[in-house]
Image (cartoon, grey):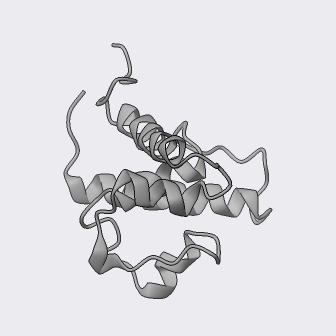
Amino acid sequence: MKEWPKADEIRWAQWRARERKALEEGKIATNTRIEGKSKLVDYQAWLLREKNGFSDLSPEAIRDLFPPEVSIKSQILPLSFQKIGDLLFPKTNDPDNRKKRAADARNRVESEFGRGSLKRRK
């Protein structure tokens, strides 16, 4: 699988996150064809681990990718898996479990790019 430029990967993940959020909010039909196999939280976690995950977005556009209780500032990226887990999985009691969930979420998106332990088989 040919590697994408990092900026293209970031835009692709941002688009998938917007798409999943619109689907969850009922703004697009559930039978709409969407690409990517991961969930909204997976794309959110992946973007939070990217240094330039939001560099091309306004603060409002960044806020639109996350629930209202999640506050993100693009200048502090990348976040640690622990911080991502705390932000995206707050209902999970065990801090180590939140950290693992964040790492697993990122790994699912990495697999879509043919990287990570879940990478697609040829």
Q: Is residue 43 above or below residue 59?
A: above
Q: Is residue 104 above or below residue 14?
A: above
Pinpoint residue 9: horizontal percent, then vertical percent: 31, 52
Near-viewer residue (21 or 117): 117
Residue appearing at x 58%, y 45% in the figure: 94
Q: Quadrant of the C terminus?
A: top left
The residue furthest front is 94
Visible residue check, residue 13: no
Pinpoint residue 78: horizontal percent, then vertical percent: 28, 63
Near-viewer residue (96 or 39): 96
Visible residue check, residue 66: yes
Residue appearing at x 33%, y 62% in the figure: 79
Number of labelled discs?
A: 0
Near-viewer residue (10 or 28): 10
Taking the image as shown, residue 61 lies to the left or right of residue 80, namely right
Pinpoint residue 62: horizontal percent, then vertical percent: 47, 77
Pinpoint residue 47: horizontal percent, then vertical percent: 39, 58
Q: Is residue 26 above or below residue 106?
A: below
Residue appearing at x 28%, y 79% in the figure: 75
Taking the image as shown, residue 75 lies to the left or right of residue 28, namely left
Residue appearing at x 71%, y 48% in the figure: 32
Q: Quadrant of the N terminus?
A: top left
Near-viewer residue (113 or 107): 107
Q: Is residue 19 above or below residue 93?
A: below
